[in-house]
Amino acid sequence: MIFEEKTIETTRIYEGKILNLRRDKVTVLNGESYREIVEHSGGAVIGALTDDDNLIMVKQFRKPLERVVLEVPAGKRDGNENGEEVAVRELREETGYTAEEVVHLTTMYPTPGYSEEALDIFLARKLTPGETDFDENEAIDICEIPLEQAIEMIMKGEIQDGKTQVAILMIKEFLERERDR
């Protein structure tokens, strides 16, 4: 049986630049309980595919993991941007590329157990190279990886970023369905 929890009260614990944290008192089957919830404006992820099926990817140091992570370009919403605007902006800023074709593949919730963050995932094709425009604190390396190699890297556990895994696997499936039409 599914029980829909109702919020009784909310307490703001933290307000930050990237996220907020609140504690909700909720109704549960046996009375009341608490949920700590991360509020995040959401963002977008963009898998940019060259004409010869290479993914444009980025490597950057991620402090929570204390290591460099291989990812597809992504970023958070600024203001009232929609997902496609975020994806196109991040692709240009992080890689210098612009895309003639941008396709929405899915929306995912990376951690629904404690966060309301939603990520829109896109495929970009018909790319044109250009100049990067990194945020002032970004240090990013750009690389090209064949799509099939990226899938192999996911299966071997070499690509561990969840949003990147979903984007790459969605791109593969999208292309296969497109070819089957």
Image (cartoon, grey):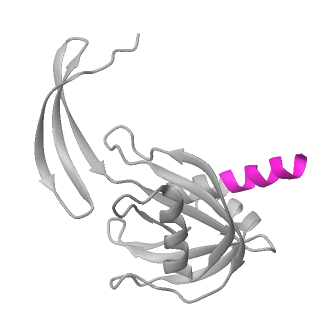
Location of residue 145 (image quadrant): bottom right
Location of residue 105 in the rendering, given as x and y in whole percent from the top left corner: 63, 50
Residue 110 covered by magenta stretch:
no
Q: Please, is residue 8 above or below residue 137 in the view?
A: above
Q: Main secondary structure of the magenta part?
A: helix
Residue 177 covered by magenta stretch:
yes
For image coordinates 81% across by 47% down, the residue present is: 177
Specify whether residue 171 is in view: yes
Location of residue 125 in the rendering, given as x and y in whole percent from the top left corner: 72, 68
For image coordinates 37% across by 58% down, the residue present is: 80
For image coordinates 52% across by 52% down, the residue present is: 120
Residues shaded magenta: 170-181
Q: In this view, does 43 lie to the left or right of 160?
A: left
**Which residue is the extreme one toward the bottom?**
131
Location of residue 111 (image quadrant): top left
For image coordinates 61% across by 88% down, the residue present is: 130
Q: In this view, does 119 lie to the left or right of 79?
A: right
Location of residue 19 in the rendering, given as x and y in whole percent from the top left corner: 25, 56
The one nearer the camera, 166 or 133, is 133
Specify whether residue 159 is in view: no
Q: Please, is residue 34 above or below residue 60 in the view?
A: above
Q: Please, is residue 139 above or below residue 122 in the view?
A: below
Picture quarter with the N terminus: top left
